[in-house]
C-alpha cells in the first residue's frame, strides 16, 4: 500500500482564463477502488491526463506507482491480440492472460484474431485484462461502459470488484455501486473523497444539500438585509454630500466659517459611509460564495405533438444482414402513443440499424416498417463525431430556436464561458448535451434516442429521467443503463 499525494494542484488549458483546478489538495490510497464522479466538463478526464503527465501544471503530484490509462492507443489495429498483449504486458504469462479473459467471459480464441475485428465490448475487456496484468500499476479507467451492453456492464463490474488500485470514471450508478469502495467527486466549489459506494455517497450528498439549502435560505435573507443596508449607507452619503453642494453662507447664515465646517463634516461622514459600504459588499461576497456548492438541476420540457392515430408505427418480420451475415431476424413490434420501448440485446445485434431504418436511412433489409408520412420524429444519434463550429451555426443549420436551444443547454449546466467556445473543444459529455438539447427543441410525435446517456453525467441522467417520467411521451430507446430504463418504466424488446 502507498499513497498518491496531490498538493496545491492548479491547472488551466492554454489560452483559457478559467482554472480547471485551483490549489487542490488530497490523498489517494493505491489500494482503493475509487469511483470518480462529477458534472461534464468539470475536469475528470483532465485530472487523469495530469496524473499521466500529459500536461504541465503548478503544484505537486507524487506517487510510488506507475499510472496506466484506459483506453490506451493501439499502435496497429491489425495486430493479433496475442502480439498486442506481448507489447502491453510483456512480463505476463500466457496462462495469466487466459485467466483474466475467462473472468471477463471472453473466449481465449480472441487471442488469435486481429484487434480490429473485435467488437467494442471485446476491445474493452481485452484492454482491461492486459492492463491489470501489469505490475506496480494504478489504473485510470475512463468511461469503460460506453461500448458495453447491459450484460457486458455486469461482467466488467464483477471483474473490477475483484481488483484494487484504480480510479473508475463512470456515470453508471449500478457499476459504481458494485465495484468501488471510495468516491472522488468534483463539486461546484471543491473536491471531496468519501468512503463507500455511489449510493452511500449520494445519500450523504443529499443530506448535505438539504442542510445547505436551509443555510442558503438564511444566507439569502442576510444578503438581502445587507444589500438594503448598503443602499441606506449610499443614500446617507449622498444626503451628506448634498448639504455642501450649492450652499451660499451669505444668504443663510452670517458666519462665513460654516461652509468649511460643513465641508469637513461631510467629508468625514462620507468616509464612514463608504467604509461601511465596502464592509457590507465584502460580507455579501463572502456569503454569496457559500451558496455555490449545491448541484441544482432545472426541470426540462419535451415538446410532444399529438398524433391523429394511437398507433405510431409497426415493424413486421424485419431482418437485417451485412455481407451475408444476419445481425437480426424476424423482428416485430408496435409503438403506440405513450409507449416507451427499449431495444435490448448484445452489441452488434442490430439495434442501431433498426433505428437508422426507421429514420429513413437506406439499409438492406427484408420485412416492413409501417408508418404514416406525417409522423414527426426527433432523433438523438449515438455518433457525434465531427461536431464543430459555434452553437449559433449549429442551431441555424438545424432550424432550431437558438434562444430555446441555449436555454436548455444552460439547464444542462452549460456556463457562460462554454457558450463562447467552439463545439469541437467540448468534452464528449458536453457534445452529447448539444445533441440532447437539439432533440428537446424539436416538436415530435416520436422521440428516438440511441444511447443518449453515453458520456452524460449522473445529474443530467436524472434530469432526463424526471423529464420522461413527467411527460406523456412516445419513445424508442437504445440504452444500456438499466437503472435509467427501469426508472422511466421502459418495456424491453429483446433482439
Image: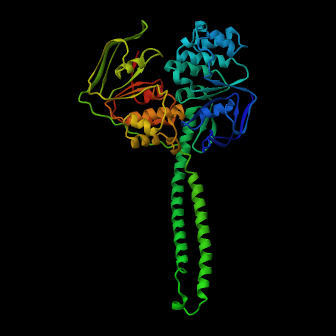
Q: Residue at x 23, y 30 (%)?
A: 308
172 is higher (above) or lower (below) than 296: above
Foreground residue among 203 and 24: 24
User: Is 459 left, or right, of 490 in this rendering?
Assistant: right
User: Is 378 left, or right, of 253 in this rendering?
Assistant: left
Q: Position of residue 248 (x, y in %)?
A: 53, 86
Q: Residue at x 53, y 73 (%)?
A: 238
Q: Position of residue 68 (x, y in %)?
A: 67, 24
292 is higher (above) or lower (below) than 279: above
User: Is 201 left, or right, of 300 in this rendering?
Assistant: right
Q: Quadrant of residue 95?
A: top right
User: Is 407 left, or right, of 54 in this rendering?
Assistant: left
59 is higher (above) or lower (below) than 51: below
Q: Residue at x 50, y 37 (%)?
A: 459
Foreground residue among 115 and 464: 115
Q: Quadrant of the N terminus?
A: top right
Foreground residue among 8 and 191: 8
User: In this figure, what is the number of numbered marks?
Assistant: 0
Q: Position of residue 443 (x, y in %)?
A: 33, 35
Q: Quadrant of the C terminus?
A: top left
Query: What colour scheme governs how the chains and residues are painted in the rendered image of this protein?
Result: rainbow
Q: Residue furthest left?
A: 308
Q: Is residue 149 visible?
A: yes
Q: Is residue 98 visible?
A: no
Amino acid at each position: 500500500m502507498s499513497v498518491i499525494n496531490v498538493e496545491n494542484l492548479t491547472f488551466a488549458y492554454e489560452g483559457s482564463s478559467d482554472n480547471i483546478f485551483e490549489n487542490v489538495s488530497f490523498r489517494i490510497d493505491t489500494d482503493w477502488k475509487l469511483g470518480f464522479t462529477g458534472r461534464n466538463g468539470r475536469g475528470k478526464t483532465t485530472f487523469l491526463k495530469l496524473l499521466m503527465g500529459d500536461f504541465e501544471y503548478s503544484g505537486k503530484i507524487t506517487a510510488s506507482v506507475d499510472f496506466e490509462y484506459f483506453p490506451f492507443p493501439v499502435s496497429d489495429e491489425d495486430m493479433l491480440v496475442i502480439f498486442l498483449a506481448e507489447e502491453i504486458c510483456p512480463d505476463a504469462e500466457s496462462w495469466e492472460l487466459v485467466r483474466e479473459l475467462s473472468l471477463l467471459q471472453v473466449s481465449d480464441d480472441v487471442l488469435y484474431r486481429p484487434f480490429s475485428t473485435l467488437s467494442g465490448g471485446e476491445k474493452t475487456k481485452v484492454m482491461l485484462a492486459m492492463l491489470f496484468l501489469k505490475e506496480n500499476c494504478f489504473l485510470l479507467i475512463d468511461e469503460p461502459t460506453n461500448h458495453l451492453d447491459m450484460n457486458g456492464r455486469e461482467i466488467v463490474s464483477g471483474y473490477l470488484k475483484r481488483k484494487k488500485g484504480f480510479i473508475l470514471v463512470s456515470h453508471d450508478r449500478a457499476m459504481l455501486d458494485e465495484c468501488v469502495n471510495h468516491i472522488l467527486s468534483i463539486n461546484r466549489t471543491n473536491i471531496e473523497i468519501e468512503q463507500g459506494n455511489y449510493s452511500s455517497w449520494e445519500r450523504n450528498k443529499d443530506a448535505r444539500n438539504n442542510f445547505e439549502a436551509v443555510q442558503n435560505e438564511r444566507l439569502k435573507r442576510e444578503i438581502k438585509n445587507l444589500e438594503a443596508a448598503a443602499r441606506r449607507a449610499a443614500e446617507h452619503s449622498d444626503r451628506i454630500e448634498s448639504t455642501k453642494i450649492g450652499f451660499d453662507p451669505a444668504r443663510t447664515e452670517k458666519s462665513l466659517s460654516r461652509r468649511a465646517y460643513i465641508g469637513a463634516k461631510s467629508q468625514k461622514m462620507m468616509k464612514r459611509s463608504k467604509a461601511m459600504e465596502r464592509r457590507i459588499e465584502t460580507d455579501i461576497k463572502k456569503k454569496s460564495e457559500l451558496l455555490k456548492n449545491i448541484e441544482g438541476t432545472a426541470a426540462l420540457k419535451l415538446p410532444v405533438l399529438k398524433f391523429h392515430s394511437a398507433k405510431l408505427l409497426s415493424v413486421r418480420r424485419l431482418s437485417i444482414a451485412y455481407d451475408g451475415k444476419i445481425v437480426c431476424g424476424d423482428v416485430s413490434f408496435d409503438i403506440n402513443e405513450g409507449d416507451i420501448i427499449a431495444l435490448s440485446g448484445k452489441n452488434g445485434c442490430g439495434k442501431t440499424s433498426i433505428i437508422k431504418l426507421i429514420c429513413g436511412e437506406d439499409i438492406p433489409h427484408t420485412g416492413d416498417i409501417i408508418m404514416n408520412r406525417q409522423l414527426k420524429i426527433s432523433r438523438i444519434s449515438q455518433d457525434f463525431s465531427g461536431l464543430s463550429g459555434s452553437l449559433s451555426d449549429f442551431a441555424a443549420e438545424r432550424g432550431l430556436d437558438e434562444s430555446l436551444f441555449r436555454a436548455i443547454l444552460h439547464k444542462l449546466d452549460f456556463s457562460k464561458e462554454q457558450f463562447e467556445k467552439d463545439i469541437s473543444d467540448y468534452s464528449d459529455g458536453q457534445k452529447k448535451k448539444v445533441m440532447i438539447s437539439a432533440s428537446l427543441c424539436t416538436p415530435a410525435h416520436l422521440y428516438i434516442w440511441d444511447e443518449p446517456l453515453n458520456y452524460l453525467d449522473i445529474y443530467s441522467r436524472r434530469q432526463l429521467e424526471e423529464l420522461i417520467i413527467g411527460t406523456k411521451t412516445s419513445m424508442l430507446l437504445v440504452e444500456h443503463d438499466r437503472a435509467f430504463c427501469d426508472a422511466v418504466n421502459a418495456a424491453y424488446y429483446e433482439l
